[in-house]
C-alpha cells in the first residue's frame, strides 16, 4: 500500500499499488448494472476542425508530438533521477520545502507557481516550460536553490541538476482577498490534479485519463510527462498545455483554469492509441467514502460521517436527473449509468452541514464536488462508478469516469472537450424534488426480530426529498414508484415531513433468497404527481450480507 503524503490539507496518497492488487479480483466480484440504453452514435476523431492549427502553433506541435509518439514504443523517462531520491521516506520528503520567494512570476503577476521536488513516490519527474509574450516556450531548469533541505533531507541538494525536472506544481491566486495568494490548483502524480474554489478545501481529485479500470488484467495509469504554462494577462484565466503518456495511449491536453467561488477548467484532449484499450475513462474522478448516513452499520467514531463525496449525479440527454448515493461496499462493486450525449455528470458532496461531520481538521463539510459539462466526444457510453472496500479514510476508494461504448484500438484517435467545475453541494438548482438523505435499517419493531428470523433479512429504506416550492403535496395525486432487481419491494409510503419542506419515501426490501455472492439489489425510486415525474431518480445498489 502506498504511503499517504500530507501536502494539501488532506492525506494525498497514491492508490496505484492498492488498485493494481485489487483490480484482478474485480471481474469475479463486481456487480455490473447498466440502467439505460440509447441510440448508436459515433465518437469524435482528431481532425482539422478540432485542432488549433496555425491559431496556436505551440499547442499544435504538442498534438503532433503525441500523434507521433503513439507510433513508437512506450518509454518512461526518470530524468536520470538519483536512486537515493527514489528511496527516501515520507518524513524526509516532507523535509524538502519549496521557498515561496522562488515562485514563478513572484511579485510580477497575480498568479504564481510553486513546484514539488522529485523523489519519494514521484520517481518520474515532469518537464515544465513557460510561455511569455514572445510565445516561445522556455524550459524551466531545476534548481536546488528553490528548496530548503531540512533535517534528514539536508544531504540531498547535491543529487539533482538542471535537467532533473519537477514532481509537479501548484498554482496560487488571490482568490479570497488581495493580501494573500491562495493555492487553488495542483498537478502532482500520474495524471492527477486537484481544484478548489474560494471557500473549499481539497478533497476529490480529477485525472487526465483512466485506462482499463476495474478490468481483470489490471489498471494502467497514464502520466503527464511535460507541461507548458502560459503567463496569464491581468484578470484572465491561466492556460496550461500538457503531454500524457502510457503504454497504450499518447495524448495532448489544454487546460484553461479560472479561479473563482467555484473554480472552472475548460479541458480539451487529443488522444492517440498506441495499443488497444478495452476501457477508456474520460474525465475521471477519484474520491473517498468511508461511511455516511446510509451506511448499514455504525462505525466506532465520534464523527457521524466521513467522506469526501456522498454521491454521483447524472443528467441524461433527455433531462432525467439520476442520483446515486455512494457506499463503502462489503465487496468490490462496479455500476454504470448508460446514455448518449449526457447534459452533465459529477461526483458531489451534497451534504454540507457541519453537524453531520464534526471534523474540525478534515473539514469534510466544505469539500467540493466536481461537475462535468460535456462539449464534444461524449456520444454513446456510460458513467461508470467503482467502489472499493476500505477500512481507512486515507485510502481513496471511489472512482468514476465516462467510458465510450466502443473500445479504443491501436492507430485510432479521439477528441474530447468538456468543462470541469468545483461545486458546493449541488451544481444547479433543480425544479425537481432532490434527494436530501438516504437511510436504512432493520424492517422490524423492537422485539419482533426474535419472533420471525426471516424479517432480519428485510431492510427498510427511508429516502427524503426536498419539496419544490412550486409543488404542493397531495396524497391523492402523488405516487411513490419503486423498482428493484434481485429483491421484493413492499410497503411503499410517501408523506411530508419537516413541516412540509421535505417528502419522505419509505419502503421494505427483501433480497432474493439464495443469491450468489455477486448479486446485488439494484433499486430505483422517484415521485410522480398526476402521472408526471416530479423528483429526480434515486438509484441505489444494496449488497445483502
Image (cartoon, rainbow, N blue to C red):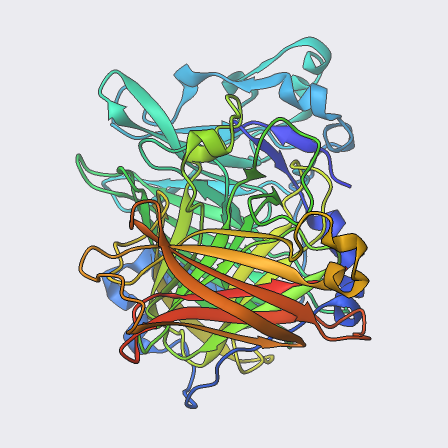
101 above or below 36?
above
Residue 511 percent coordinates (x, y): 70, 70
Residue 518 percent coordinates (x, y): 76, 71
For the C terminus, the quadrant is bottom right
Q: Relative to residue 260, is residue 398 drawn left or right?
A: right
446 above or below 39?
above
Q: Relative to residue 132, is residue 221 drawn left or right?
A: right
Residue 363 percent coordinates (x, y): 48, 28
Q: Residue at x 36, y 76 (%)?
A: 341
Q: Residue at x 77, y 67 (%)?
A: 29
Q: Can residue 212 be seen at all in this image of the molecule?
A: no
Q: Nearer the viewer, residue 61 or 95?
A: 95
Q: Relative to residue 88, is residue 464 drawn left or right?
A: left
Q: Relative to residue 334, is residue 116 drawn left or right?
A: left
259 above or below 375?
above
Q: Nearer the viewer, residue 398 or 461?
A: 461
Q: Can residue 312 be seen at all in this image of the molecule?
A: yes
Q: Residue at x 30, y 59 (%)?
A: 57
Residue 298 percent coordinates (x, y): 67, 40
Residue 323 sits in quarter? bottom left
Amino acid at each position: 500500500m502506498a504511503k499517504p503524503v500530507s501536502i494539501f490539507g488532506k492525506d494525498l496518497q497514491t492508490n496505484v499499488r492498492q488498485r493494481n492488487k485489487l483490480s484482478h479480483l474485480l471481474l469475479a466480484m463486481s456487480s455490473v448494472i447498466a440502467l439505460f440504453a440509447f441510440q448508436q452514435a459515433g465518437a469524435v476523431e482528431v481532425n482539422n476542425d478540432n485542432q488549433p492549427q496555425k491559431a496556436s502553433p505551440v499547442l499544435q506541435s504538442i498534438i503532433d508530438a503525441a500523434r507521433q509518439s503513439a507510433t513508437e514504443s512506450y518509454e518512461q523517462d526518470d530524468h536520470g533521477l538519483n536512486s537515493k531520491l527514489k528511496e527516501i521516506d515520507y518524513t524526509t520528503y516532507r523535509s524538502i520545502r519549496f521557498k515561496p520567494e522562488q515562485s514563478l512570476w513572484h511579485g510580477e503577476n497575480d498568479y504564481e507557481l510553486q513546484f514539488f521536488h522529485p523523489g519519494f513516490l514521484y520517481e518520474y519527474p515532469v518537464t515544465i516550460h513557460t510561455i511569455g509574450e514572445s510565445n516561445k516556450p522556455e524550459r524551466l531548469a531545476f534548481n536546488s536553490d528553490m528548496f530548503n533541505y531540512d533535517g534528514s533531507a539536508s544531504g540531498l541538494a547535491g543529487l539533482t541538476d538542471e535537467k532533473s525536472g519537477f514532481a509537479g506544481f501548484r498554482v496560487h491566486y488571490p482568490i479570497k482577498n488581495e493580501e494573500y495568494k491562495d493555492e487553488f490548483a495542483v498537478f502532482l502524480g500520474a495524471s492527477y490534479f486537484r481544484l478548489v474554489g474560494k471557500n473549499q478545501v481539497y478533497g476529490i481529485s480529477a485525472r487526465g485519463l483512466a485506462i482499463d479500470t476495474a478490468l481483470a488484467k489490471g489498471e494502467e495509469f497514464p502520466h503527464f510527462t511535460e507541461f507548458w504554462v502560459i503567463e496569464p494577462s491581468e484578470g484572465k484565466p491561466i492556460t496550461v498545455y500538457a503531454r500524457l503518456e502510457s503504454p497504450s495511449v499518447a495524448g495532448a491536453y489544454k487546460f484553461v483554469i479560472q479561479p473563482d467561488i467555484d473554480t472552472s477548467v475548460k479541458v480539451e484532449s487529443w488522444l492517440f492509441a498506441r495499443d488497444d484499450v478495452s476501457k477508456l475513462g474520460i474525465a475521471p474522478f477519484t474520491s473517498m467514502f468511508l461511511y455516511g448516513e446510509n451506511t448499514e452499520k455504525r462505525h466506532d467514531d465520534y464523527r457521524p460521517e466521513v467522506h469526501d463525496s456522498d454521491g454521483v449525479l447524472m443528467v441524461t440527454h433527455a433531462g432525467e436527473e439520476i442520483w446515486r448515493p455512494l457506499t463503502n461496499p462489503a465487496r468490490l462493486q462496479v455500476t454504470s449509468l448508460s446514455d448518449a450525449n449526457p447534459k452533465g455528470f459529477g461526483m458531489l458532496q451534497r451534504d454540507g452541514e457541519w453537524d453531520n461531520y464534526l471534523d474540525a481538521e478534515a473539514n469534510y463539510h466544505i469539500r467540493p464536488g466536481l461537475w462535468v459539462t460535456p462539449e464534444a466526444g461524449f456520444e454513446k457510453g456510460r458513467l461508470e462508478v467503482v467502489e472499493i472496500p476500505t477500512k481507512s479514510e486515507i485510502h481513496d476508494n471511489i472512482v468514476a469516469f465516462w467510458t465510450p461504448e466502443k473500445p479504443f484500438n491501436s492507430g485510432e484517435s479521439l477528441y474530447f472537450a468538456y468543462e470541469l467545475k468545483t461545486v458546493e453541494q449541488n451544481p444547479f438548482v433543480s425544479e425537481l424534488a432532490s434527494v436530501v438523505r438516504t437511510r436504512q435499517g432493520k424492517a422490524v419493531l423492537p422485539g419482533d426480530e426474535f419472533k420471525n428470523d426471516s424479517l432480519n433479512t428485510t431492510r427498510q429504506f427511508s429516502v427524503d426529498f426536498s419539496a419544490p416550492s412550486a409543488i404542493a403535496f397531495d396524497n391523492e395525486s402523488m405516487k411513490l414508484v419503486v423498482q428493484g432487481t434481485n429483491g421484493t419491494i413492499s410497503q411503499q409510503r410517501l408523506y411530508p415531513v419537516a413541516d412540509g419542506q421535505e417528502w419522505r419515501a419509505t419502503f421494505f426490501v427483501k433480497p432474493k433468497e439464495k443469491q450468489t455472492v455477486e448479486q446485488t439489489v439494484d433499486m430505483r425510486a422517484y415521485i410522480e404527481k398526476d402521472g408526471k415525474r416530479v423528483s429526480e431518480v434515486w438509484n441505489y445498489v444494496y449488497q445483502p450480507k
